[in-house]
Amino acid sequence: MEFLKSGGRRPGTERRRPVIVLIFDSEAIPEADRAEALSEALSGMETPQTVTFRNSRPIRHRMEVFELGTGVHLLRNRGTPIHLVRNTRHVRLGTREEMALFVQSRGEALITAGGTYSWQSGQLGALDVTRPYAMRQIGDSDNSVLLIEFDRLGLPVDQIRAAIPAIGSSPLYRLIQKHLLLLAVDLPADAAEMTGLATADLVAALVATVCDHPQARELLNATEPARIAAYIDEHLSDAKLMTGQIAAAHAMSARQLTAVWRRAHDATPADWIGRRRLERARQMLTDPALAPASVDDIAYACGFSDTADFSQRFRAAYGISPQDFRGPAPRRPERRGGRDADPGQR
């Protein structure tokens, strides 16, 4: 069907170019066909399951998938409430060996998987998609679902499955929750793959904190730099971001944090923050969607509190001023008949 831009299958890892794929857009489908089309899209993209709709209003829904490297994908859904059921018959049909991490920025749902609980807006949840489950949304919703294959986590599958119901007790719960809500996906393929690597490390660390296995401590230590880097990136806009704040968020002292960072990156956390702010500013300066924003606006958005200092640092790093790097502002169309019109047209 035409609405299935990927042919009803998750984008293959061999295709490195389209990082974002539109899977379903109700606006492009006749109203009478939307229920069947959305059901097919959801079942084709995720796992075999039954999809129903209990809503008297017309279906309004949009679903996109973001490829973040091998074995890591993010689904984003917005719109009509849905009811998903994966029963034992569906399980026998098979699926990828993966877990789903999910968070809603709007709406709530009821989840049944070894018990029934309410999934509130902003709450992080997890499912083993190889097991039966049900999810009933209550009202319209916006949600993000991270699908990550078990073999990306570096732990035995039985330990991962045992840990999934306990992720709410992890000290990394809030960090992963915010990461999933703020995860940037409008990225070139190489940057998206790096983001996927860091995200896989974060999820592995989340599982390891509630996992009773000898490899868990080793995995936590190995993923510590990735977790810290993700936290820094999510807080770059905070001009007051300091080493102490980062250390406290990761249950360590400022001295321990500095030692970890020097071993991993041969730099202090403060130096890294400055470098990442400049890199983000450089990206934002070339983003056509941000053309209306001034250079000063971009500096503040990247956590610089002094625009003169930003310009000086940018020139030192890249050999050009932020304004010159950005290029001339788009010319505005000339007004006809006004005082700014061409004198020859008056």
Image: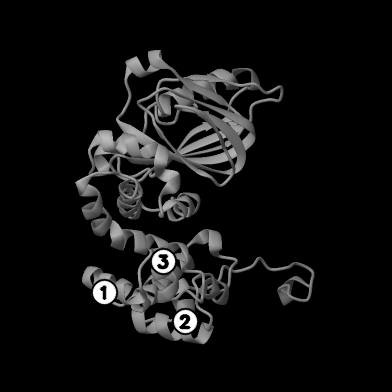
Dot 1 or dot 2: first in sequence order is 1
Q: Residue at x 33, y 45 (%)?
A: 17
Q: Which residue is mark 1?
A: 259
Q: Residues within 10 Å of mark 2 (few under 14, many from 20)?
A: many
User: Residue 10 placed where, x, y %?
Assistant: 37, 32
Q: Is residue 207 left or right of residue 34?
A: left
Type of amino acid under label 3: Ile
User: Residue 303 placed where, x, y %?
Assistant: 50, 74
Q: Is residue 230 visible?
A: yes
The residue nearer to you, when weighing 4 against 56, is 56
From the viewer's perspective, is residue 27 above or below residue 34?
below
Q: Is residue 11 visible?
A: no
User: In whole angstroms, how far apart are the C-alphas of marks 1 and 2?
Assistant: 27 Å
Q: Which residue is mark 2?
A: 310
Q: Which residue is mark 3?
A: 232
Which SS class for mark 1? helix
